[in-house]
């Protein structure tokens, strides 16, 4: 399941999304480039033979649109929301069809391989596996399409904002630039990456004084930015806390910054959420909890946790993540180390 989530997150990553969004927006005519009829050297009134007002000469501003998309808070939040929804839905699909597959396994176990019942169970099992794969693939594709459509909407919102900021400064044209080549593709030396860069931005030289990227970013932060933060762990304080059931105080972390929890223990995780530097209230303070790792106990979205009765086969440590509901880009993580009921660590496995 974790491998599936990692693959999906990679497909929903910014690099893949940005290229898809930019390509779709460019094809759809949403590019932020030049005015409809730019004039570099307009003719004089006498040459034109008319008293009509002449077009203005180009006054060009430059914006690194890739960086604006990368830092766009609404897009980042949507990306995380869709990835988490895909993760939960994939788990539900696997569980539902897994029960069918397991039932057919039980039938096959009690039947002769040459019997009709065995062959029927095999057929049903293969059909269930196929339908599970198709359902997962269909949901993943629809999720990617939803994210791409939202990305194009954000592209247009940012384009309009860039237009407004350019006009305030007396510009009548905005061209896209790529200030950091590494933001286009991870393989900086690949010819394909160069092609992608030139597709997104054909500008090879510009005067930095006309780069208004930072001004547009500041305006975007003011409109769509988040004031939500979480108190991080430092010097034994802050970060994710854990209080055992009937416990008076939160459990202190060990020297490695891990929270130690005994097998079979119940408790609750907590985190201090801030809004504009002050303790958040109401919906702004709401968070969602989840964990990674098989057979590591039960954790509710509200942070209530019951550890397993036995050590997991995969090991005695796992990760707990808390994420803001209002701004899913804000999160904190902590490593949990399970101890036996006497407070001892998991014994080393025999080699």
Image: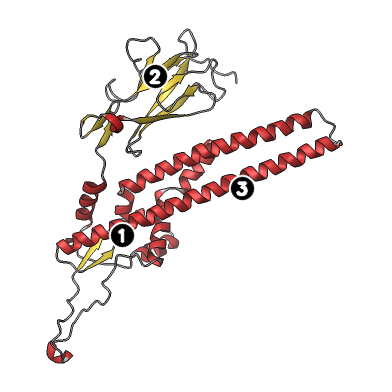
Give neighbour class at mark 2: few <14, some 14-19, many 20+ (Cα, 10 Å).
some
Label 2 – label 3 distance at C-alpha: 38 Å
Q: Position of residue 27 (x, y in %)?
A: 41, 67
Q: Is residue 338 left or right of residue 125?
A: left
Q: Is residue 52 left or right of residue 76?
A: left
Residue 66, compared with residue 37, is above or below; it is above
Q: Position of residue 58 (x, y in %)?
A: 20, 73
Classify mark 1: helix, strand or loop: loop
Discs 3, 1 touching: Cβ within 8 Å: no
In the rendered image, the residue lying farthest to the right is: 114
Residue occupied by mark 2: 268
Residue 288, compared with residue 6, is above or below; it is above
Classify mark 2: helix, strand or loop: strand
Q: How is the image coloured?
A: secondary structure
Q: Residue at x 33, y 50 (%)?
A: 70
Residue occupied by mark 3: 134
Classify mark 3: helix, strand or loop: helix
Quadrant where the C terminus lies? top right
Q: Earlier in the sequence, mark 2 or mark 3?
A: 3
Q: Is residue 77 left or right of residue 310?
A: left
Q: Position of residue 80 (x, y in %)?
A: 40, 42
Give neighbour class at mark 1: few <14, some 14-19, many 20+ (Cα, 10 Å).
many
Q: Position of residue 253 (x, y in %)?
A: 35, 18
Residue occupied by mark 1: 178
Q: Residue at x 34, y 24 (%)?
A: 240
């Amino acid at each position: 399941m974790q491998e599936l989530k990692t693959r999906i997150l990679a497909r929903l990553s910014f690099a893949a999304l940005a290229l898809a969004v930019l390509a779709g927006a460019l094809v759809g005519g949403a590019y932020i480039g030049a005015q409809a009829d730019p004039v570099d050297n307009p003719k004089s009134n006498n040459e034109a033979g008319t008293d009509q007002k002449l077009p203005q000469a180009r006054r060009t501003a430059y914006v690194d649109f890739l960086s604006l998309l990368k830092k766009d808070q609404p897009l980042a939040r949507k990306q995380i929301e869709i990835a988490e929804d895909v993760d939960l839905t994939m788990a539900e699909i696997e569980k539902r069809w897994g029960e069918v597959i397991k039932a057919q396994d039980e039938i096959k176990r009690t039947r002769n391989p040459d019997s009709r019942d065995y062959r029927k169970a095999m057929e049903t099992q293969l059909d269930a596996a196929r339908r599970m794969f198709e359902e997962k693939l269909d949901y993943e594709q629809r999720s990617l399409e939803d994210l791409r459509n939202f990305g194009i909407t954000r592209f247009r919102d940012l384009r309009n904002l860039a237009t407004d900021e350019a006009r305030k400064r007396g510009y009548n044209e905005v061209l896209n630039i790529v200030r950091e080549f590494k933001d286009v593709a991870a393989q900086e030396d690949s010819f394909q990456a160069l092609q992608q860069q030139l597709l997104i931005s054909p500008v090879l030289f510009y005067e930095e004084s006309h780069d208004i990227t930072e001004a547009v970013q500041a305006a975007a932060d003011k409109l769509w930015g988040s004031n939500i933060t979480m108190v991080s762990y430092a010097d034994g304080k802050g970060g994710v806390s854990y209080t055992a059931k009937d416990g008076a105080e939160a459990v202190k972390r060990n020297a490695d910054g891990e929270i130690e929890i005994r097998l079979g223990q119940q408790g609750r995780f907590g985190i201090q959420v801030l809004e504009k530097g002050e303790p958040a209230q109401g919906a702004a303070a709401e968070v969602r909890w989840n964990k990674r790792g098989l057979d590591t106990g039960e954790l509710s979205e509200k942070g209530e946790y019951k550890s397993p009765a036995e050590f997991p086969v995969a090991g005695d440590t796992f990760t707990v993540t808390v994420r803001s509901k209002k701004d899913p880009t804000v999160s904190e993580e902590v490593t949990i180390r399970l101890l036996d009921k006497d407070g001892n660590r998991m014994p080393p496995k025999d080699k």
